[in-house]
Image (cartoon, helix red, strand yellow):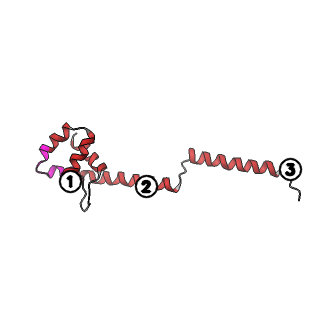
Amino acid sequence: MNIPTWVSPGLYGAACGAAALAVIGFGWGGWVTGGKAGDMAAKASQTAVVTALSPVCVDAAHRDPDFAEKLVELKKTSGYSRDEIIMKAGWGMPSGATGSNRDLARDCGSKLVL
């Protein structure tokens, strides 16, 4: 069986075009894999939870009888240590949760020391 001479350049062109399309699509076109999309969704949901619950954390801090003392301590410490103080106080623990959320504590601390 004889293969026409135009088939080889056509196949090379199709392969190069497919490769270029993939590079352009994933590089600049905004295409993502399923795993990357899942990671992006998880990060977005975590950010939404922190945004929604941060006012609750601030309110819990203001209702704490020892708030004034802890606020002085918060203002003295650096940003990373504030997370621990808020988590230890229980302000960064949403209702029904079994543990504190570090991202929530960080956001709450930044709002409290303003």
Report if residue 105 is visible in the image: yes
Q: CA distance from mark 1 to mark 3?
A: 76 Å
Q: Seen from this angle, which residue lies furthest right?
A: 2
Q: Which residue is mark 1?
A: 90
State the extent of the magenta-drawn residues as a range.
58-69
**Residue at 36% across, 53% down:** 46
**Residue at 55% across, 51% down:** 31
Q: Amino acid at mark 3?
A: Thr
Q: Report x, y in % for residue 109.
A: 24, 44
Q: Nearer the viewer, residue 57 or 76?
A: 76
Is residue 60 on the magenta stretch? yes
Q: Quadrant of the C terminus?
A: top left
Q: Amino acid at mark 1?
A: Gly
Please tell me which of labels 2 and 3 falls first in the chain: 3
Q: Is residue 8 left or right of residue 56?
A: right
> Circle 3 — which element?
loop
Q: Nearer the viewer, mark 2 or mark 1?
A: 1
> Circle 1 — which element?
loop
Q: Amino acid at mark 2?
A: Ala
Is residue 92 on the magenta stretch? no
Q: Seen from this angle, which residue lies furthest left?
A: 65
> Circle 2 — which element?
helix
Residue 3's disc is none
Q: CA distance from mark 2 to mark 1?
A: 27 Å
Q: Is residue 25 left or right of residue 87?
A: right
Q: Which residue is mark 3?
A: 5
Would you identify the image quadrant in which residue 53 lies? bottom left
Q: Which residue is mark 2?
A: 41
